[in-house]
Image: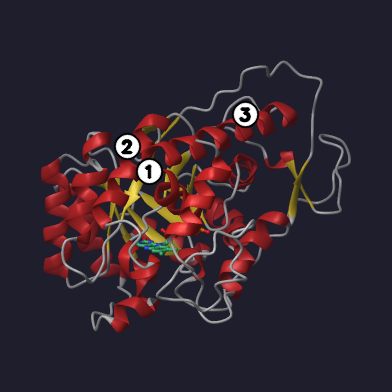
Amino acid sequence: MELNEIRDRARELSRGFCRVCPSCDGRACAGEIPGMGGAGTAASFKNNLAALAAYEFVTSLIHDVKRPELRTEVMGLSLSMPLMIAPVGGISFNLGGPVSESVYQRAVGEGAKAAGISCGTPDAAADGVFETGLTDAGKPLDHLIMPFVKPWEPELVKAKLELASRIGCKAAAMDLDSAGLATLRIMKRPCLPKGMREIREIADHAHAFGLKFAIKGLMTADDALRAADSGADGVIVSNHGGRVLDSMPGTAYVLPSVARALRGRAAVFCDGGVRSGGDILKMLALGADCVMAGRPFTIAAVGGGAEGVARLAASWRQELETSMIMTGTASVNDVPDAVLCRRGHWSTRGGTRDPAPPVPS
Ligand SMILES: Cc1cc2nc3c(=O)[nH]c(=O)nc-3n(C[C@H](O)[C@H](O)[C@H](O)COP(=O)(O)O)c2cc1C
């Protein structure tokens, strides 16, 4: 199945809940939560794409990089390329029920398996969403997935981590930014942020269950350092695809300062607005060890099932490889920031290049 066929089918099935726009940039669906949109004006969603678009590639063509290395390992997960499918929950709630939660998660898991990548699985106020992800997406991947737990009460978090461990997972995460999620308020199950002592306890439980533990939704170097100091093994720079608070910066804009502050103390993930293999390379150059993408894979899974997910991943893989060859990047595990310049500021690679991308203080 071709990508345009997959997208056409997704558009038809989601009956206006997602318009499957030519560019998934938050403009058409602003404020649509429940739905696929960003909160309020969707500035946070739009800023994710704008922050990536603010960088351009600096090519290099006299080199020996003919077959770049795309494989990587992060948080104990072995990946054929540095990409994971982001957790997307409440498919029936947010997309008007074109497929069930279980069918969706299975498509994501099987598609990720075919592509040699992994996925996050969601948690929600509705009963069974966490378990559905664990089993339906988890099974095809031998449970080498990253289940996300919402910042619920400590006993519930502990029980969910224990379940993830029992089923065979090696890593888990918490989307701490769900504190801002309107859907949880609508379902009368809001969550709140957690202090360092609480995070430490959760990380300790995860480690006792044999799980590596990451925190998603952090947007500053200070929060990332607090997470690492509290025992987190990974930090996921994310604004939840713009769904938790209007008027946040794009993730690619804040990523360098987070990566620089952590200096390898925790794995760095980033998501938000990733729409191509080239965007993956940009995020790596800005400091990510691994990249996540949400909506494009939701559209692929709804329109093409597991085949759609694998097809999209294969297309991004090709684009990533091409971008690496064109910039002389030998390995995804060592991407210099010199492969990027700020839009309109062409650099000369190793010569008198323009200053590095500005980093917010
Ligand atoms: C409909 C929808 C549901 C989501 N559900 C979850 C969730 O359950 N847990 C979570 O951590 N993130 C969730 N996210 C956020 C994604 O994991 C990810 O951070 C975001 O989609 C990345 O932005 P992108 O869609 O531009 O790639 C959801 C996003 C959407 C659009």
Q: Are marks 2 and 3 in contact (CB under 8 Å)?
A: no
Residue receiving disc 2: 110
Residue receiving disc 1: 305
Q: Are marks 2 and 1 in contact (CB under 8 Å)?
A: yes
Can residue 175 be spotted in the picture? Answer: yes
Question: Dot 2 surroundings within 10 Å: few (below 14), some, or many (20 or more)?
Answer: many
Residue receiving disc 3: 321
Reply above or below: 358 against 36: above
Callout 3 secondary element: helix
Looking at the image, residue 80 sits to the left or right of residue 104; the answer is right
Question: Dot 1 surroundings within 10 Å: few (below 14), some, or many (20 or more)?
Answer: many
Q: Are marks 3 and 1 in contact (CB under 8 Å)?
A: no
User: What amino acid does circle 1 point to?
Assistant: Gly
Query: How many marks on residues?
Result: 3
Q: Quadrant of ligand 1?
A: bottom left
Q: Position of residue 172 (x, y in %)?
A: 27, 50
Give the quadrant of residue 278: top right
User: What amino acid does circle 2 point to?
Assistant: Glu
Nearer-N-terminus badge (3/1): 1
